[in-house]
């Protein structure tokens, strides 16, 4: 199962058109959320710029402060970007972001190393172009 599907498998659809505050509130009530594979959602927040998800890796596969990891992680994130942007389960979140003129950011942190990197960062303009607000 993709990271995206794991992230949003638990998302509610009780509202026909949830706001970003609704989405953040739902996630915060279920944190931390274990995604398996040594990953967990540790924090979900909303700021003036974007909705932000912080994932923590136990670094059992590799440490984020490893020189090789620092080289390949941005490339892996870039390779996943288009698939993540087109992920069916994410469209409701992206539409809410576009409607509220906010972006989407996914940050990964290493539990052992303390290192972090931005894995996904979709600015509001990109989301509005891909998912134009209807209202």
Image: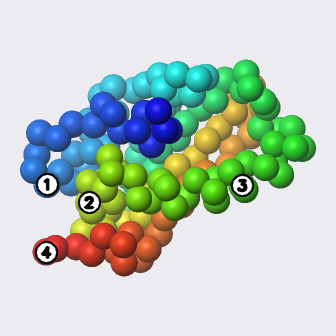
Left-right relation of 87 to 25: right
Look at the picture and state if 130 lies above or below 92: below
Give me the disc on residue 135: 4
Look at the picture and state if 86 lies above or below 66: below
Look at the picture and state if 9 lies above or below 78: above
Evaluate whether residue 54 shows in this view.
yes
The secondary structure type at the circle numbered 3 is helix
* Disc 4 versus disc 3: nearer the observer: 3
Measured Cα–Cα span from mark 4 to mark 2: 11 Å
Residue at (87, 44) in percent of width and height:
68
Q: Which residue is mark 2?
A: 96
Give me the disc on residue 17: 1
Residue at (83, 52) in percent of width and height:
71
The secondary structure type at the circle numbered 1 is loop
Left-right relation of 5 to 114: left
Give me the disc on residue 74: 3
Evaluate whether residue 118 shows in this view.
no
Measured Cα–Cα span from mark 4 to mark 3: 35 Å
Residue at (47, 53) in percent of width and height:
84
């Amino acid at each position: 199962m993709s990271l995206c599907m794991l992230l949003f498998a638990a998302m509610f659809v009780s509202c026909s058109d949830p706001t970003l505050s609704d989405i953040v509130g739902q996630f915060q009530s279920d944190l931390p959320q274990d995604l398996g594979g040594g990953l967990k959602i540790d924090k979900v927040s909303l700021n003036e710029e974007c909705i932000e998800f912080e994932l923590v890796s136990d670094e059992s596969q590799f440490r984020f402060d490893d020189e090789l990891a620092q080289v390949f992680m941005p490339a892996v994130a870039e390779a996943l970007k288009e698939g993540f942007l087109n992920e069916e389960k994410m469209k409701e979140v992206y539409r809410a972001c576009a409607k509220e003129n906010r972006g989407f950011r996914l940050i990964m942190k290493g539990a052992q190393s303390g290192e972090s990197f931005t894995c996904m960062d979709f600015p509001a303009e990109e989301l509005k172009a891909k998912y134009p607000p209807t209202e």
